Amino acid sequence: MAGIVDTAAFCTLLCLLLTLVVFKLKTATSSRHNAGVNLPPGPWALPVIGSIHCLLGSLPHHAMRELSRRYGPVMLLRLGHVQTLVLSSPEAAREVMKTHDAAFATRAVTPTASILTYGARDIVFAPFSKHLRELRKLCTLELLSPRRVRSFRHVRDEEAARLARSVAAAAPAVVNVSELVKIMANNIIMTAIIGDTGMSISRL
């Protein structure tokens, strides 16, 4: 019995030590990455949870207001290990969204998104660059142009009529309209992309 207790205590201690080592390495890497970067002010951060303790309470938006009064309209919160820029004034939001919009136009890319989009080369996750501008131009001129949208009007009309017939035929039974609308939208999109609806409303 004593041997089992000693083994459990050793495993617990080993897990704690490994956690501390990983946290120390991550902190050192983050410090080197942020070296020389002029970051906005913000509340002090605890290990693992960051600045989440500053938002505790039943009214976190009030806590956010008090933090903005203390640190200014532009502050940095650490939510866990994620650094979050918080803007709390119209002027600061205008600077980010309008004056310096190009600097904030790139989305964060997760490993999953990078794999699914071949290294973030699609229009959703591609970094702001000439490649992204070309993708947007192609979408505007070829995929979302008024001429292209009008060319699929018959598809939308057909699917809307099919939806109406399906609802009428199901009376007086209860119909899940949300599910039918979702299928109708899927049919329109699939027809526009590959010419096949993929799923019929009448199957439900």
Image (cartoon, rainbow, N blue to C red):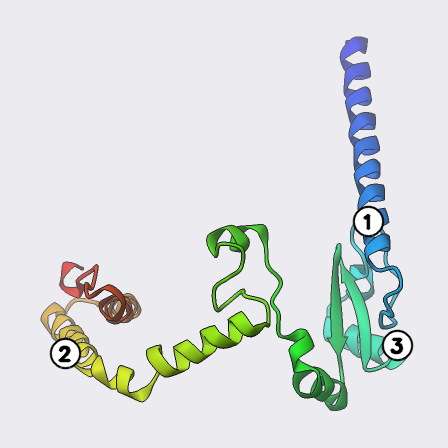
- Label 1 and label 3: CA atoms lie apart by 26 Å
Looking at the rendered structure, the kind of residue marked 2 is Ala
Q: Is residue 21 left or right of residue 119?
A: right
Residue depicted at x 14% and y 78%: 161
Binning the other alpha carbons within 10 Å of mark 2 as few (below 14), some (14 to 19) or many (20 upward) gives few
| Residue 178 position by quadrant | bottom left
Is disc 3 in contact with disc 2, using a CB cutoff of under 8 Å? no
Q: What is the spatial separation of the Cα atoms under label 3 and label 2, in whole angstroms? A: 57 Å
Mark drawn on residue 161: 2
User: Is residue 184 visible in this depiction of the protein?
Assistant: yes
Q: Position of residue 50 (x, y in %)?
A: 81, 57
Q: In the rendered image, which quarter contains the N terminus?
A: top right
- Please, what secondary structure does the residue beneath circle 1 have? helix
Location of mark 1 (residue): 29
Residue tagged 3: 71
Q: Nearer the viewer, residue 40 or 143?
A: 143
Q: Are marks 2 and 1 in contact (CB under 8 Å)?
A: no
